[in-house]
Image: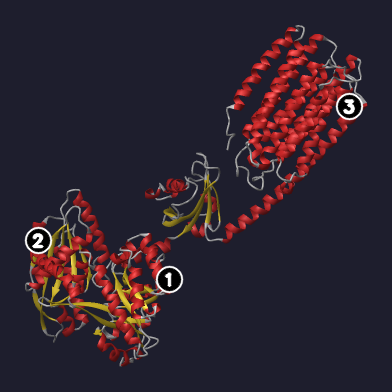
Amino acid sequence: MPDPRPRAVPATLGLLVVLAAGATAVSLTGAPGAAGLVHGALALAAGAAAAVLAGSAGRRPGRSGRPWRVLAGAAGLLALGQLLTVASPSGGPATGGAGDLPTLLAGPVAVAAAVCLLPPRAQRRLGSRVLLDGVVVTASVVLLGGVLLADVVRAAGTPGTVAGGHPLVGALLCGVGLVTVTAVSEQRRRAAGWLLTAFGAMAAGALGNAALRSVPDAGQARLWGVLTVLAWLGALGAALCAAAADPTGAGAVAPDGGRRRALPLRGGVLAHVAATAALVSLSAGVVAGRPLTVAEAGGAAVLLLLTSARTLCWALDAARLTRRLERTEGWFRALVHSGDAVTVVLDGTGTITSATGPVQAQLGRAEADLRGRALADLLHPEDHDLLARVAAALRDGTPDGLPDTGRLRTEDGTWRDVEVSGAARTGDRRAGDGLVLHLRDVTERRATHRELERMAYTDSLTGLPNRARFMAALEAALDRAGRGRSACVLLVDLDGFKAVNDVAGHDAGDRLLCEVADALRAEARAGDLVARLGGDEFALVVDAGPEDALVLAERLVARLDHTRRHGEAGPLLHVSASVGVTEVLPGADVSATVREADLALRTVKAQGRNGVRASGEALVEEVARRSRLARDLPGALTGGQLRLVYQPVAGTAQQRVLGVEALVRWDHPELGPVSPEEFIGLAEEDGLIVPLQRWVLQTATAEHARLLAGGRDLKLGVNISVRHLQARCLVEDVTRALQRSGLPAHLLMIEVTESVLMDDDERLLAELAELSALGCIVSLDDFGKGYSSLAYLARLPVQVLKMDRGFVSGIDTDPRGAALVGSVVDLGRTLGMDVVAEGVETPEQLAVLTGLGCAFLQGWLIGRPVPAAELPALVDGFDPAPLAGAVPVPVTVP
């Protein structure tokens, strides 16, 4: 961070400029007393600079202020020297004056400041190249100063002992300054650069001071005086800029001195420039007829040797770097060729400049055929924006939009799906930089993905879209309704289908479903979607208003109402259809729309079936029933109308009951048994779900503890609503129930529906994590019924997956459905989760599940729900014969 008081430096720099102008004007006039005024001005400038540098050092913590404190001392010595020069007459070139000693001492003190700027000794890595550059610069300045001053001293006819000391100080300053700027930490390099500039100006001032004392001509003396004063003022200004550029504050310089970056090239260039200047000056004097002294010839020889040694170091460094580059390139090529991806390098125009790796195998083209061609010309027209998407992904420095996929044309004209698995820029993110892409052929994988996607959205028996596809179409219809387009939903349920299955067999039932599917396709219009939701339930999304939808529903009821013989000698069975119709309204959601249509369908069923009802008619009766149930539910909680039944869960390997699931039932005194599907939703809507499930937890854990007292080892599963999780009291309720009943936490399994996957709320995840930390088992119930998100599933602390009964229904006759169940079992095994299959009702389903490796089963084949009083007899008298006699059925996908 910059100096906290930046205004002091500009003000002092302005003072230096004013003093420089005034000193120049006074010196050139040659008036009596001008020299004293000039020295006084220089003393004032040095004193002001010393004060600013000392103040800057005082505001810096610890070691970071030491260089500027020492440099302030150097400026103070310069001010003292100038004041002594004003007070005492100057001596000759051999003896000097009283101010020469402090002025000369300012140079070594400035060198000490440069040393203080370097990192600590333990972290100081100068290197032979850096030191050699400093020696070359020092020798060059000594030689150049000797050449310049020799003629002046010779012309004056005096030995010039003091004058000879000035170039030595200047040479030392330049050499140390170069070493400093090369070896200093990266954070302080700018300050070191200004310091090197100050040292150069001080060297020029020292040489000018020496020349000033040696020239006999008054005019030349005035000129040298002006140059000397300007050089010293420039040195002071550069020193102030160096202090301002140095970072300040605790932590501004890292404890290790900052990240250092060696710059032998920059130091070597400066050293060669200084050596060249010295040698050219010496050669120019020889050409002009100036005699060459022995000392100058020796210095030139030494300088040539030093420069040659530095050049040799450059050559050695270049050879070493070349070998390292070749070795690294070899490693890179070996790495590229050993992988299954192709590395393609593009220039700024998108032209391929290089392609390495298994090019022919992955891209279907030879490497030579790709080089020099624009990648966009090889992409499918719909994928021309692939490079723009990749460049946009790299715009912020991280490829968040990758991997991306496009289609690439091969040599034979076919298209391959190519994935950009990685990308990087070839430069520092400039506009004209190229790209490095890693391409991989994913044609087969994409084809498999599309087939799996088709399977996931298609009913395998009828070929109609399935529930997931229907939900997506309904989402689109809701979006269109928001823009003013009418649409309706029809739910179609077959009447009498169970009799066909029970009497004529499942094959006849499957044929009937296929015939119904064909009939629905025939009656629907081109823009309508016909889907099978499961079992004997179908749905249509009709792109029309309620009137046209009702007409279509009447046609469907008329077409599906018939009696037929199933098989040559089979019985005559009557089959009809009930249809519920609802309009897709703007602002509604998918679940509400389906619920409205389902209410209308249930009204038809309750009124004798084989008919059509719209949601408005159904709601009149349904709302009355729902209002009655909502009014009576609080009394049911306190009046003893609720009871629990328990359904067993068995293990195929253990061949015994391993646990039970608690299921709540409501026996209404007037309406009779009320299904959980009705009153659970009411409890959630009316805010009663938490007290309801709190009662279930307390009752179930107490009854289960009594069951365990008989020596049985069983787990207890309790269903929990997402609303209970959102209430942030579930952990407290579970803890209280466990404490009151004495049930161990590891025997309690909390079952949440997969709707928790759609609520990306960190608080819910934390609540489940607390339950898991408590020791409870967390289970995901009805998996596959709704919107399963594998990304969120991996984040949940879930130990058990319970497949929805819709997965199990029909797996003995539907290989593709069985394959999906197998994929869920494999998913659970991969994630380390146990998988429970719900709704196991037939031995055929049991055999298929056993073959798929499903280890835990629940359903009527295993045991029906029973009250707590009957549960010991059910568990103790469990017949493992169905499990032991189940022959695994291998499953293949056609």
Tell me which corner region of the image, top left, top right, bottom left or bottom right, holds residue 787: bottom left
| Secondary element at tag 3 | helix
Q: Nearer the viewer, mark 1 or mark 2?
A: 1
Task: Kindly indicate whether the residue at mark 2 contacts the one at mark 3 (C-beta within 8 angstroms).
Answer: no
User: Disc number at residue 773?
Assistant: 1
Name the residue tied to disc 2: 616
- The image position of residue 86, as x and y in percent, is 78, 16
Q: Are marks 1 and 3 in contact (CB under 8 Å)?
A: no
Where residue 197 appears, as percent x and y from the top left, is: 70, 29
Q: Is residue 614 above or below residue 884?
A: above
For image coordinates 10% across by 63% down, the residue present is: 619
Above-or-below relation of 384 to 280:
below
Label 1 secondary element: helix
Q: Amino acid at mark 3?
A: Glu
Mark 2 residue crowding within 10 angstroms, few (<14) / some (14–19) / many (20+): some
Residue drawn at x 78%, y 29% is 107
Which residue corresponds to mark 3? 296
Amino acid identity at mark 1:
Ala
| Coloration mode | secondary structure
